[in-house]
Amino acid sequence: MTTRRHAILLLLWALASLGAYAQGELLARLQSLQGVSGVEALESSIYTEKYVLKVSQDVVPGEPHKGQFQQRVVICHVGFDRPTILVTEGYYAHYALRKDYQDELSKLFNANVITVEYRYFGESMPEPCNWDYLTVENSLADLHRVNQLFRQVYRGKWAATGISKGGQTTMFYRAFYPDDVDVSVPYVAPLNKALEDGRHEPFLAKKVGTAVDRQRLEDFQREVLRRRATLLPLFRDYCQEKGYTFRAPIDEIFDLCVLEYPFAIWQWGTPISEVPLPTATDQQLFDNLIQYSEPNYFSEQSPYLSFNVQAVRELGYYGYSTKPFRGLLFRKSAHDYMHRVMLPAEFRQLKFDKRLYRRTRRFLKQNDPSMIYIYGGIDPWGASGVGDMKCLQKKTHLRVHTLPEGSHRTRINSFPEPERSQIIQEIRQWLE
């Protein structure tokens, strides 16, 4: 009995030593990478090891004399022999610090995760800040450097994935660096052709939901605008209490929140039954408007200035249809609202450059990469997705999957069988 207990203790000691060695090996590898600094261990309820670190990046790739910045990267480790998921975040990456964070592809395929915060967001903001260098092409060079750097640690198959603006980044990354990853999975990623793309307005007016649903939304908007005299004071007091300031008159901000309302409702899949009827009280109308169309979105305090700059410069965005509300608006047209409301004066002269849109479409037409696009059928962002490219239907590897009633929250696990299993099997074959 004593001998058996002694053997068990030796085995447990050996396993603990092996785990400590593996942990020490990963940490040593990360710390040895050139340009990596500040490696800190993070707690995880999912992964065997997790670290946050900084990667030194050129503000202008290939021109170090113009300065560097430190880009935040989070490493979630499963094993050196497992695939690696590169999360091409489009904004901040602080969510990846959470103890319970797990990317969908990592969960499905038992893979490592490298989450890269986008330049000019969060802790990845260059100092001094020169906005001329906030370009998609420069952000993709950041990802390429991260890819090449961490391939010294993870030599298996790689996949890139991202959601929304992160999904756009996944798409652009494949177009600019087609050999960096084996698989690309962009979630709910638009490919806009103009600052006000033009496809979202007819989608909201005629295509999404039922005619009854769309009428209920329009009735709500019209009723809110009709009650401007009583609702605007509530709106003004709310904004003052929150400390919001704006680059346009409060009347225009009120209108923009009303115009934004249906986009927000459909984007997040809010049940239409939650939209108040015209018989609702002033307070009910106001509370619902604020709940789904928060004015901070248009404020000078918005945390998304970096995104707004990129949207105007090359990512594009959406416009608003004001025709149903003639005679009820502060301004007759919402055209060019981003320049007027969502950017400081120093950016007012920025013009949209269509070259990124054209290059990406050309890449998708001329190539057949291993890519799975995921869209939600009621998500307005899908109106400017790649689903309208009929040539993609003839591809062997590239696939576009749209969940009919899916919102901007649509993921692979949102799909019913057998489509869900088909998507997973395709990706698994590419990662093997």
Image (cartoon, rainbow, N blue to C red):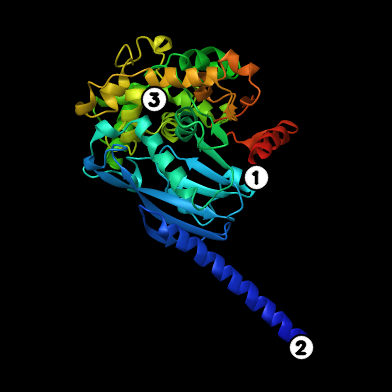
Question: Which comes sooner in the sequence, label 3 or label 2?
Answer: 2
Q: Give the x, y percent position of residue 48.
A: 57, 61
3D distance between C-alphas at marks 1 and 3: 30 Å
Question: What SS does tag 1 mark?
Answer: helix
Q: Residues within 10 Å of mark 3 (few under 14, many from 20)?
A: many
Query: Which is more foreground, mark 3 or mark 2?
Result: 2
Left or right placement of residue 396 versus residue 269 in this view: right
Tell me if residue 216 can be seen: no
User: In the picture, residue 140 is in which quadrant?
Assistant: top left
Q: Give the x, y percent position of residue 33.
A: 41, 55
Q: Quadrant of the N terminus?
A: bottom right
According to the image, label 3 marks what residue? Answer: 315
Amino acid type for the residue under numbered disc 2 = Thr
Q: Give the x, y percent position of residue 78.
A: 59, 55
Amino acid type for the residue under numbered disc 1 = Leu
Q: Are marks 1 and 2 in contact (CB under 8 Å)?
A: no
Tell me if residue 292 can be seen: yes
According to the image, label 1 marks what residue? Answer: 108
3D distance between C-alphas at marks 3 and 2: 69 Å
Q: Residue furthest right?
A: 1
Left or right placement of residue 244 versus residue 359 in this view: left
3D distance between C-alphas at marks 1 and 2: 42 Å
According to the image, label 2 marks what residue? Answer: 3
Near-viewer residue (40 or 104): 40
Near-viewer residue (248 or 357): 357
> With respect to residue 101, does 352 lie above or below?
above
